[in-house]
Image: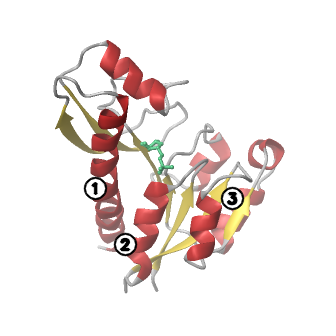
Amino acid sequence: MKKRIAIFASGSGSNAQKIMEHFKKNADAEVALILTNNPEAYVLQRADNFEIPSHVFDRHEFYETDDVIRLLKNLQVDLIVLAGFLWLVPQSLLKAFPNKIINIHPSLLPKYGGKGMYGDKVHNAILAAKEEESGITIHFVNENFDEGEIIHQSRFRIDEGDDLEMVKFKGQQLEHTHFPKVVEGLLKKMRS
Ligand code: GRF
């Protein structure tokens, strides 16, 4: 049976898109569901374009019921991928999927991570600190923001004159290249 991936995203979902593209014609794995806390998230349109089902939930459902867990279990999801998902994952979901939830973060963790460090805030902090390099981190998720065992990091140079848009662009290129491959690698390991 194909391995099944669920992706949580709160916004645009460009990483979700790359993962959906990557697994569209894959014999071993598929994206089974897109989940979001944001009914306006563009990721919902992207899911429709790939004819992948989606589910929108609110705070009550996510933190005070087991509905999301039940949905994921019913779909026999093997791996949960957070791709720009802004809410903390509740203990109940972590327990239901131990070592099966991963996240991507646009910095070289543990630098520039933690609560409130998302989107432009990360890159602005990196530029303000005059870092000469930055990168991306893919890691297992635990009960804190941007912690958990690191699975993959890749880096890029910050050149003189690089502005917010350029740093974001460089990071996004790395994310789009590596995230689908890291997901595939993890699924392969789960199979063997
Ligand atoms: C990415 O930069 C990711 O590292 C962070 O949120 C952003 C999501 O971008 N966690 P997108 O919605 O996939 O375009």
Q: Which residue is mark 1?
A: 178
Q: Residue at x 40, y 75 (%)?
A: 23
Q: Which mark is residue 99?
A: none
Name the residue: 67% across, 67% down. 54
In this figure, which residue is indicated by the disc labeled 2? 22
Name the secondary structure under disc 3: helix
Residue 62 appears in view: yes
| Residue count near mark 1 (Cα–Cα under 10 Å), binned few <14, some 14–19, many ≥20 | many
Point 47% across, 24% down: residue: 121
Amino acid type indicated by mark 2: His
- Quadrant holding the C terminus: bottom left
Check disc 1 and give the amino acid type.
His
Q: Nearer the viewer, mark 2 or mark 3?
A: 2
| Residue 72 sits above or below residue 104 on the image | below
Q: Amino acid at mark 3?
A: Ile
Question: Where does residue 123 sit, x and y in percent of width and height?
Answer: 38, 27
Q: In this rendering, which labeled residue sits more in front, label 3 or label 1?
A: 1
Q: What is the basis of the colouring in this image? A: secondary structure
Q: Looking at the image, is mark 3 or mark 1 earlier in the sequence? A: 3
Query: What x and y, as percent, mark residue 56?
Result: 74, 57
Crowding at dot 2, Cα within 10 Å, few <14 / some 14-19 / many 20+, comes out as: some
Image x and y of residue 64, in percent: 81, 44
Q: Quadrant of residue 155?
A: top left
Q: Marks 3 and 1, how far apart in space?
A: 27 Å
> Going by the picture, which residue comes out furthest to the front?
161
Residue occupied by mark 3: 69
Secondary structure category for the residue under label 2 = helix
